[in-house]
Image: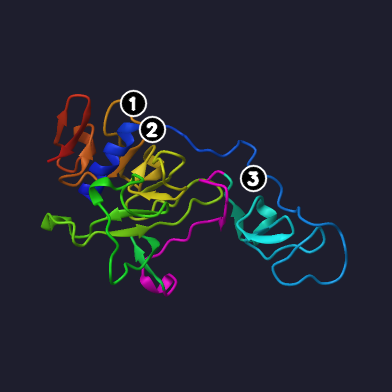
Amino acid sequence: MKRMMMAFLLVLAVGCGNTSGGDDDGNNGGGGGGGGGGGGGTLPQGLCNATHRCPDGQFCFNGICALGCTSNKDCGDSMYCDTEDIGPPFFCKNKTVPTCTADSQCAASQVCLKNFCSLKPPEVKPTCDPDKAGSAEDGCDKYAICVDPNEQNNTKQDAYCASFPPCPESGVCPTGQFGAVCNDGYLSGKGRFCMEGMCKDNSNCPSNWNCVKPYTNAVLGFCSSGAPGMPCESNNQCASNNCAGFPGMAGVCM
């Protein structure tokens, strides 16, 4: 956790702010109903026109169904087209983000990780660098972050790419176990997913936790419980009432 927090701090220090490429009206990528003329009858699977729409999660491109979406009408009732994400293409995402307390509440291919359903770590883990977690160079895809569940051993041999759910339609992620905030362009090269442990303010953190900014005027911070070793800005944010501070930067609860 501490290694990932430090890696995030380095990434955020390079460039913060909302750099999302999506237009304000959510209409990136053009219309989704195009392709082909009218015409009746039944079209072969994978083809489309003005009267024959594609399956949910696909859009009509020049008469051929393509994976992705251009608007909500290309998605199922419980999903939306996230045109604010890195793209095109854009994809259908769940309107709400489910949380979990046990693996049984997730799909068979997932585990419950910090109250979010996450892809199970593969038996043969791809190479990733937890010291670059949150950057496009951490070795993971745009919806995953390199984490090390055993960072106490001071090696990277257990590091793997942990995936987290895409942001909901509202843009407000569930707090989960350690807090979460939607990546609206804060981590360059990563998609719009719920960043576990990160926050813009206390509302992104569990009850009675604090959102601690790592340095003056930082846009994002880390959710802190106030336990020893957790970040702090003042003594009252620590269970011990003792925050060892640093000039212009967050301190550490003693």
Residue stretch rendered in magenta on the structure: 84-108
Residue at 32% across, 51% down:
178
Is 40 left, or right, of 196 in this rendering? right
Callout 1: SS: loop
Q: Quadrant of residue 51?
A: bottom right
Q: Which residue is mark 1?
A: 217
Q: Which disc is residue 29 wearing?
A: 3
Is 150 left, or right, of 91 in this rendering? left
Locate the C terminus and report the quarter of the image it occupies.
Answer: top left
- Between marks 3 and 1 in the image, the one whose residue lies nearer the viewer: 3
Residue 107: within the magenta? yes
Is 250 left, or right, of 178 in this rendering? left
Distance CA(mark 2)–CA(mark 3): 26 Å
Across and down, in percent, residue 177 comes to 33, 55
Q: Which residue is mark 2?
A: 16
Q: Quadrant of residue 162?
A: bottom left
